[in-house]
Amino acid sequence: MSTSICEVGVDRGTQDLRGDLERRLSLATPRDTVRGMFCLGTLEAVRSLAGEAAMRLCVEAGGEPRFVEFFNYPVSTYLRVNDAAARVLEPVCGGWEEAQRQLGRRATADMLHSAAGKALMMLSKGESRRLLGMLPSAYRSAVNYGERSVVWEGASRGRILMRRDFMPSAYHEGVLLAALERVNARSVSVRAWRMGLLDCEYLVCWQ
């Protein structure tokens, strides 16, 4: 199975993205929340790749003494944990964007191991198109902000539209790649267009 990522459209240089945190935080409200399992998964990814000390830095960045899997936390907390994680993983992964992709892959793995994720896999019947079509509902079970939709352009080609989503586009590239790999899609390609700070479109195709 081969996987490729290619990005076109709006220039989304790494330095600009690495400096987006404060702007994203300014748009988040206390009502925008995310499941604790994603915070825990991010911390475990850091621990396994960069060690306990690096993980503790990320915990401190989040401002929470501990995380509980099924609790909901402000997305601002997760953004701080994610930003700290990407920065400490940058030298390990070969860049900030690749670190974000790896964190997105970890988020997919954690989601698919949950009860909701197992139900998603059962309902998708291992079919790539069916799985992608169900992603908007899967996101709603994990976070309570933003809007996501799928527009099909062919049997194995579609656009994932994400509006008011706080995570970097490279993170969602990892999410989408890992989801399709889970159902053994081949020659997966994800192309991201940033339409605004919180809005992005992802052209996804596979064989």
Image (spheres, rainbow, N blue to C red):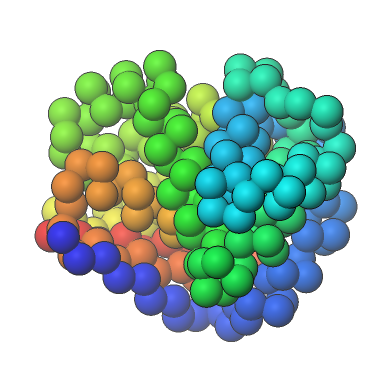
Q: Residue at x 48, y 56 (%)?
A: 102
Residue sitting nearer the eye, 49 or 151:
49
Is 177 placed above or below 126 here? below
Q: Position of residue 59 (x, y in %)?
A: 77, 40
Q: Quadrant of the C terminus?
A: bottom left
What is the quadrant of residue 18 in the picture?
bottom right
- Figure label count: 0
Q: Residue at x 78, y 60 (%)?
A: 21
Q: Is residue 38 left or right of residue 61?
A: left
| Residue 35 seen in this snapshot | no
Left-right relation of 42 to 71? left
User: Residue 136, image x and y in percent?
Assistant: 44, 37
Please say whether residue 64 is visible from this viewpoint: yes
Horizontal arrangement in the rendering, residue 53 relative to residue 35 (left or right) = right
In x, y percent, where is residue 135? Answer: 39, 38
Q: Quadrant of the N terminus?
A: bottom left
Q: Give the answer, above or below, for where 144 lies relative to 167.
A: above
Residue at point 17% right, 34% down?
126
- Toward the viewer: 195 or 98? 98
The image position of residue 52, as x and y in percent, is 68, 44
- Asked where in the image residue 89 lies, by quadrant, the reply is bottom right
Q: Residue at x 82, y 47 (%)?
A: 61
